[in-house]
Amino acid sequence: MTTQEKSVVMVSKANLLKMLLTTKGATMVSVMTSTDPGKSAKHKGIVEKHSYINGCLNAKYENSVNRQQGREGGEMDFVAKPRKWGVRIPKTPVVHHINKAQEEKHYLTIHVHKVYGTKYLVSGLEVDRETVEQHLKPHRSQKTEQNVEKEIIPRDYDLANVKVLTMKGTRYVIV
């Protein structure tokens, strides 16, 4: 096996959560998620969206923005607002949330560095975005008070939607 090849491990969602709860320090990852981007109940189940993301776990948002402000020659004065939903489990990349239906959910927080691609599928066949546009939620504008050219992009991904996670030389396929 060359250094570029990854070992592949099948892991349950429960074991993925346990692994993430013990992941310490800033850690680079690649993730493939699969979501239903339907804009309403009428549009659910028609399109499947696969996203391929590279980013960092356990990055501190406020510190990341302040460092970026400094790199760009600005004041390092950013103060993050509190989360609007869920509770970040301290020193982990995991957010715990109990939704309106009283279901317990966990989310993976990633500071996105690069989106490698997005695929849209209908009945398992890849189609272009324009073909399914009428079924998709509109892009929402991201309000930011970061005062930077290169925005820091934190995203929370429902662990149920994470299908593959590559970290520290191992590709974890969630089953």
Image: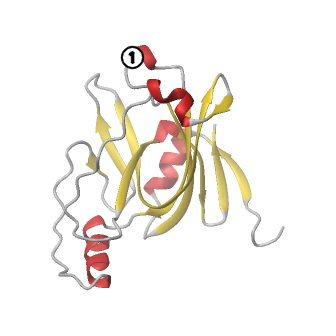
For the residue pair 140 and 111, the one nearer the viewer reads as 140
Residue 103, image x and y in percent? 34, 27
169 to the left or right of 113? right
Q: Position of residue 58 (x, y in %)?
A: 39, 64
Which residue sits furthest front? 130
Residue count near mark 1 (Cα–Cα under 10 Å), binned few <14, some 14–19, many ≥20: few
Residue 99 image-quadrant placement: top left
Type of amino acid at the residue the image marks with label 1: Ala
The front one of 103 and 144 is: 144
Q: Where is residue 56 in the image (x, y as percent from the top left)?
A: 46, 64
Does residue 52 lie above or below 160 as drawn?
below
Dividing the picture into quadrants, the one containing residue 59 is: bottom left
Of the pair 120 and 163, the residue shown nearer to us: 120
* Image position of 8 with respect to 48: above or below: below
Which image quadrant: the N terminus? bottom right
Residue with the most extreme top position: 42
Q: Mark 1 points at which residue?
A: 41
Please give the name of the residue rendered at 16% of the width and 57% of the height, measured from the top-left corner: 81
